[in-house]
Amino acid sequence: MTLQTALIVAGIVLLLLVVAYNQWQIRKARRPRALQPEDDLPPMREPVVSPVIKPEVSAKLHEPSPEHQVERREPTLSASPLDAAAVAARMAASSADADDALADEVAVAAAPSSTHAPHAAAGKPGHAEESGQPAGSAEPHDAADHEEHAEQVKPKQEPAPAKEPQPEPVALDGQPTPAVIDPLIDCIVPLHLERKSSGDRILPLTGRLRRAGTKQVHIEGLRSEANAWEPVTAGHQYEDLQVAVQLANRGGALNALEFSEFVNAVEALAEALDASAELPDMTETVANGRELDAFAASCDVQLGVNVISDGAPWSAAYVQTVATQDGLVLSRDGTRFTRYQANAEGVQRALFTLQFGDTNFLRDDLTAKAGRQITLLLDVPSAAQATKPFKTVCEYGYSLAQRMGAQLVDDNMRPLSESSFVAIFGQLQTLYDKLEARGMPAGSPVTLRLFSL
């Protein structure tokens, strides 16, 4: 029991010592200490510059930078009244006020040098070089002397080259210039846009506006810059649109089913573009298509002359060789050769075709295929009257007949005489006049569209 009592007493004494030591440490930490000199200084935000500066270091600090024309003075701990006042203000202010005081000091120090800047800027370009002084070393002058000196050394400036005037598109009578769509053969649906729309937005929406049945569909946009209609093109802005379906072609007139297909596509486009469409009446449109188709049928004339062999038949290989040497071009399907001729605009147009029976020059055995008749066929509405296409056909036919030992005959196998030529020319003139009166001369773009598939 004596040992246990001793251990308990020792533990209590040790605990009291630990508590007493902790209290002594707390009181020691709270004891006030003597005021130190450094307590009067605010915390420094920049490193303090030593008051002892070597001469070479001082020279480097005061050396002006070659990149700056305005003289700059580095802040130092010199005994000048300005610097002393600035340092005292900086030591007495808070950290935020110290920044403002330093900025003011730099501005005051730079003030004498900056007085030259407006004067140098007021001079003309090249003034410092002509006077023989550096750009930043000009002395102040009064306003009169400066203006007189600037007038004397003013450099001669070359006039800027004049811009070439850009030609502007010309519109007839203020109306938009027409493009492909023509009211003579098209049913036109105007689309009024709420705001301008770009071709990049319109083109992806025109997938269904290619054909309506067997009839071509065209879409054009009105560009305000050119005051002209044009096929919708990416990158252009359009104020209005017009969509048209052809009323007739060599496949027949526009029927009700094709018209409905066209209208559904136009309505879908108008909804996608937030546009309003002026849809025509179906009955009237179909009737216009039938009338146009009847007119086209009355003018759809293909005039042919034949070269008939006087002796043995010709092989297809021989006919192909002659046609190729004469510059005729084989069609893609291989059934005919075509003679092309440039129109007034320099565009090559088909003038007439050469056929050798039912021969296909791409599939048939040309050495085994033979015949005694070559047909030269003229599509009258597609060839311009000014090119005198029938005369050209007859001249080429006579040339073939002489070279191949043959004779030139008409569709009734009668030799072409002078009287027959006169009769044919009279019929052609009547046909040309009929097309001209309708506003669709032979060989014109609108006529080519009407007499095509």
Image: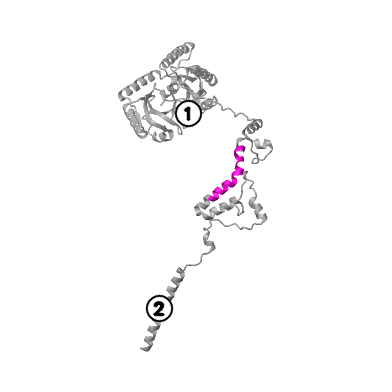
Q: Few, some or many C-alpha atoms within 10 Å of disc 2 (few <14, some 14-19, many ≥20)?
A: few
Q: Which residues are magenta?
A: 101-119
What type is the residue that disc 1 sits on? Ser
- Which sits in the foreground, 349 or 60? 60
The mark found on residue 331 in the picture is 1
- Residue 256 is left or right of residue 165, and the answer is left
Q: Position of residue 419 (x, y in %)?
A: 47, 10
Q: Position of residue 392 (x, y in %)?
A: 51, 18
Residue at image x 50%, y 54%? 95
- Name the one closer to the observer, 317 or 291: 291
Mark 2 or mark 1: whose residue is earlier in sequence: 2
**In this rendering, would 121 be left or right of 25?**
right
Q: Quarter holding the C terminus?
A: top left
> Where 252 falls versus 65 (above or below)?
above
Residue 16's disc is 2
Residue furthest to the bottom: 2
Q: Quadrant of the N terminus?
A: bottom left
Q: SS at mark 2? A: helix
Residue nearer the viewer, 315 or 21: 21
Residue 115 magenta: yes
Q: Looking at the magenta stretch, what is its main secondary structure?
A: helix
For residue 201, what is the image quadrant?
top left
* In the depicted structure, whether residue 253 falls above or below residue 83: above
Amino acid type indicated by mark 2? Leu
Residue 441 position, x and y percent, is 44, 18
